[in-house]
Image (spheres, coloured by chain):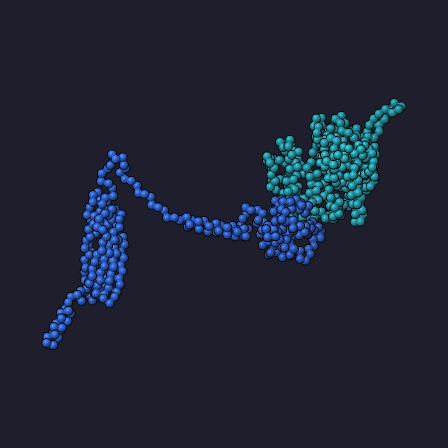
Chain colours: A cyan, B blue
């Protein structure tokens, strides 16, 4: 792929981002992160309060990408088989087996949205592990492949009853965990509440022109983006230092209030997590029309790619929401480059 | 008649030449003393001896009493000898200062010791005795305890008035303050005030950069990065410059130079092609100097 084609793709990506921002107001940061995940071909976990626009954002992304879209609601009685097939009696009274949400569109499936993933049982989570890692599944004695599938899952952080925390392995397979917060700007809130355009979500989503970024070309494009940007030795060292600081923060002079830093971290980020960080950072550099990877690219995606894959000691887990952002901020302020 | 007159004149001349007043070795001797009464313990008594001798007669100074203790209650504190030679001879003025350490219970007659002064001329020694001098010493304490009168036996002396030394102390304080100010200024100039973190950051980097050439470009960049990171208190990156200027507004004037520096550093460290332009090293040194000037408020 030529550099001019990469440049054309970047223009398309920025237009795509602009379209989403016109639909989802006040979420520029989250939209940019989602766009990065799409072009880095990573799965995304969304977290936020109820009604802040998580689902609308995902529908808007799916509409903009084109391709087929499937959605499933996580419930406590959802079983893995429910994703693969469903059975029913047809009009002749005979039992029928039809493909479930995962198999229905075959390899045309581009966006799979798992709503309220933490309400599903661990069995469902483990099925999802393979789907996310290998983009394939075994069913009806054959392999099904979903080369273009990207999983978006969301969980709300308000309710904790009847929920199952995602296992570490499942969380690690998500490239990013994006937090969706309520917009702080009053004029945006006013617009969202009083402008009838935002009352009908279906119509709002339909305004987005589909296929602006062709989903079936994304894999090839992502490979070219990753190949076109080569990190220097100094940047590799910076990334390794960030990684080390996430595992052994005390060695970088990081101290959080009321925390024994030697006990804080149970497990740092995995190598897979670091590769996600670099992939996302390269896309960020590409979106900024750069062919060199800078520390600020890593910083731009560090929190969303790292925070959900660093595991705190259980004695500090009840302060996770306070400690993790502070730890991320401290790491970025402790590691210098070069 | 004339003959008689001449004989009388000759006789008188001869008689006058036989007079001892011409050959007398000590022509004048006087001991001058103060009042001979009313001395108490600790008082000093000055005795002055005035002697006029014939020319050439030299006083033997070792014939004077030695300075120091004369006896149990009398010390010779000082001896001063002045001599003036003239045509008529030599005039000596000898001042002796005695101090009394006698504490009598009643008024008591005491005396300074007698001694003999010796003079020397043509191998002959001439002696002149200085006589004793009597004086009375009085007790310092009252003779009778008068407790019945409701008075203390001894009353303390009035405190001696202190010499006014305020002017001296003011001058001392002023010069000390001036010395302190100069010391602080010198310490600031030489970057020794480590406890003032904002005011010593760029001093050392300027010196380090001055010794580096273009071949040490990576080191130059690292030195500058380290200095900026220290100032910022955290690693400074180009996208954090606006926040940096909010904390350190004085560095806003170096915005162009700082942005050039970060751009140059990014290309050097993070691009595959780490080329440097001629003069880049001088620009980094200039930036560091400008930062030092800002740090010292000279810009």
- Number of residue marks: 0
The single residue placed furthest to the right in the displayed view is A92
Location of residue A170 by image quarter: top right
Q: Quadrant of the N terminus of chain B?
A: bottom left
In this view, the residue in front, A173 or A63, is A63
Compared to residue A4, the image places residue A32 above or below, namely: above
The single residue placed furthest to the front in the displayed view is B1
Location of residue A313 by image quarter: top right
Compared to residue A295, the image places residue B60 above or below, namely: below
Q: Residue at x 60, y 47 (%)?
A: B230
**Picture coordinates of residue A327, whole percent (x, y):** 64, 38
**Picture coordinates of residue A32, whole percent (x, y):** 74, 40
**Picture coordinates of residue A144, whole percent (x, y):** 81, 35
Q: Residue at x 20, y 45 (%)?
A: B107
Q: Is residue A45 visible?
A: no
Q: Is residue A259 visible?
A: yes
Q: Residue at x 12, y 72 (%)?
A: B8
In this view, the residue in front, B184 or A296, is B184
Is B175 displayed left or right of A292 in the figure? left
The single residue placed furthest to the bottom in the displayed view is B2
**Picture coordinates of residue A78, whole percent (x, y):** 77, 27
Location of residue A165 by image quarter: top right
Compared to residue B65, the image places residue B106 above or below, namely: above
């Amino acid at each position: 792929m030529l550099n001019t084609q990469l440049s054309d793709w970047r223009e398309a990506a920025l237009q795509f981002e602009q379209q989403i921002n016109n639909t989802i107001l006040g979420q520029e940061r989250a939209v940019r992160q989602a766009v990065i995940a799409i072009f880095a071909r990573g799965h995304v976990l969304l977290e936020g309060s109820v009604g802040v626009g998580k689902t609308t954002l995902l529908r808007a992304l799916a509409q903009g990408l084109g391709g087929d879209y499937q959605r499933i609601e996580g419930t406590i009685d959802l079983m893995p088989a429910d994703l693969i097939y469903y059975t029913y009696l047809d009009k002749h009274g005979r039992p029928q087996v039809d493909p479930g949400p995962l198999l229905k569109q075959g390899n045309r499936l581009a966006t799979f949205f798992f709503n309220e993933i933490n309400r599903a049982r661990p069995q469902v989570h483990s099925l999802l592990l393979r789907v996310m890692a290998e983009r394939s599944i075994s069913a009806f004695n054959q392999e099904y492949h979903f080369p273009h599938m990207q999983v978006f899952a969301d969980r709300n952080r308000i309710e904790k009853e009847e929920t199952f925390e995602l296992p570490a392995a499942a969380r690690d397979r998500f490239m990013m965990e994006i937090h969706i917060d309520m917009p702080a700007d009053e004029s945006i809130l006013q617009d969202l509440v009083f402008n009838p355009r935002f009352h009908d979500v279906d119509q709002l989503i339909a305004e987005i022109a589909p296929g602006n970024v062709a989903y079936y070309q994304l894999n090839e494009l992502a490979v070219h983006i990753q190949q076109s940007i080569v990190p220097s030795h100094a940047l590799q060292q910076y990334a390794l230092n960030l990684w080390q600081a996430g595992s052994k923060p005390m060695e970088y002079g990081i101290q959080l209030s009321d925390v024994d830093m030697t006990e804080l971290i149970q497990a740092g980020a995995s190598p897979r997590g670091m590769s996600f960080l670099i992939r996302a950072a390269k896309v960020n550099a590409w979106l900024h029309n750069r062919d060199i990877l800078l520390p600020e690219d890593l910083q731009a995606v560090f929190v969303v790619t790292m925070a959900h894959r660093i595991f705190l000691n259980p004695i500090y887990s009840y302060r996770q929401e306070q400690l993790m952002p502070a730890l991320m901020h401290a790491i970025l302020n402790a590691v210098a480059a070069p | 008649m004339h003959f008689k007159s001449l004989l009388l004149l000759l006789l008188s001349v001869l008689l006058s030449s036989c007079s001892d007043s011409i050959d007398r070795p000590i022509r004048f001797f006087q001991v001058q003393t103060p009042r001979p009464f009313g001395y108490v313990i600790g008082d000093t008594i000055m005795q002055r001896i005035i002697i006029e001798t014939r020319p050439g007669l030299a006083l033997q100074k070792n014939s004077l009493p030695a300075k120091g203790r004369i006896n149990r209650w009398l010390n010779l504190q000082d001896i001063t000898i002045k001599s003036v030679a003239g045509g008529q001879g030599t005039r000596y003025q000898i001042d002796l200062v005695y101090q009394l350490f006698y504490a009598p219970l009643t008024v008591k007659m005491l005396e300074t010791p007698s001694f003999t002064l010796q003079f020397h001329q043509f191998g002959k020694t001439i002696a002149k005795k200085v006589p004793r001098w009597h004086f009375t010493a009085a007790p310092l304490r009252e003779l009778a305890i008068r407790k019945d009168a409701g008075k203390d036996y001894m009353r303390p002396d009035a405190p001696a008035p202190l010499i006014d030394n305020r002017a001296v102390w003011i001058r001392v304080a002023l010069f000390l303050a001036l010395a302190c100010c100069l010391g602080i200024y010198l310490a600031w100039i030489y970057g020794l005030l480590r406890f003032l973190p904002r005011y010593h950051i760029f001093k050392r980097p300027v010196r380090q950069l001055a010794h580096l050439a273009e071949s040490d470009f990576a080191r130059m960049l690292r030195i500058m990065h380290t200095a900026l990171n220290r100032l910022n208190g955290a690693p400074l990156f180009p996208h954090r410059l606006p926040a940096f200027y909010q904390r350190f507004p004085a560095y806003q004037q170096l915005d162009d130079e700082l942005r050039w520096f970060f751009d140059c550093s990014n290309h050097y460290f993070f691009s595959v092609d780490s080329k440097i332009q001629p003069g880049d090293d001088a620009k980094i040194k200039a930036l560091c100097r400008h930062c030092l000037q800002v740090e010292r408020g000279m810009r």
